[in-house]
Image (cartoon, rainbow, N blue to C red):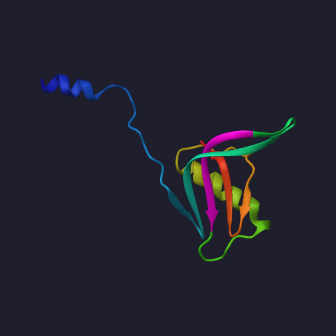
Amino acid sequence: MATLGALGACTGEAPSRTPAPSLTDGPYVSVLREAGVGEVITAAGAEPIEGNTLTIYSPTDPLRYDQGLIAKKVAIRACTARMMRFNPAAVGIYDAPNWVFPGACR
């Protein structure tokens, strides 16, 4: 019976892994929230994307509107650190003092 129980545990399915809700990257913090809908800009106009939403902020030096590229680079690293992929075409939203990337991390 012990052998059957051990075989039953080897179903070939990977255990589900929950990504870290927040990570620190130098002076920046990324917060991951599930189920976000954002937009990407295409030749046909804005199109919706679905995925996890990332919020990037700095607890020591609030982000400004002109720091969108920095926030996007942090968001890319944050998705990668969570074993996910960041959609570089995702539109970021400045919500002072945060940069938010809805639906960008999958």
Judged left or right of residue 87, residue 47 is right
Query: What residue sits 56% from the left and 58% below the top?
Result: 31
Q: Is residue 53 magenta?
A: yes
Q: Quadrant of residue 69?
A: bottom right
Where are the magenta residues, as a range? 48-57
Q: Height in image: 42 above or below 36?
A: above
Position of residue 75 measured from the top left corner of the image (x, y, whole percent): 64, 55
66 and 34: which one is in front? 34
Query: What residue sits 62% from the left and 70% below the top?
Result: 58
Query: What residue sits 44% from the left and 46% below the top?
Result: 18
Q: Is residue 89 magenta?
A: no
Q: Furthest-right residue in view?
A: 43
Secondary structure that dominates the magenta span: strand
Position of residue 83 measured from the top left corner of the image (x, y, whole percent): 53, 45
Can you say which quadrant of the picture contains the C terminus? top right
Q: Quadrant of residue 60?
A: bottom right
36 and 89: which one is in front? 36
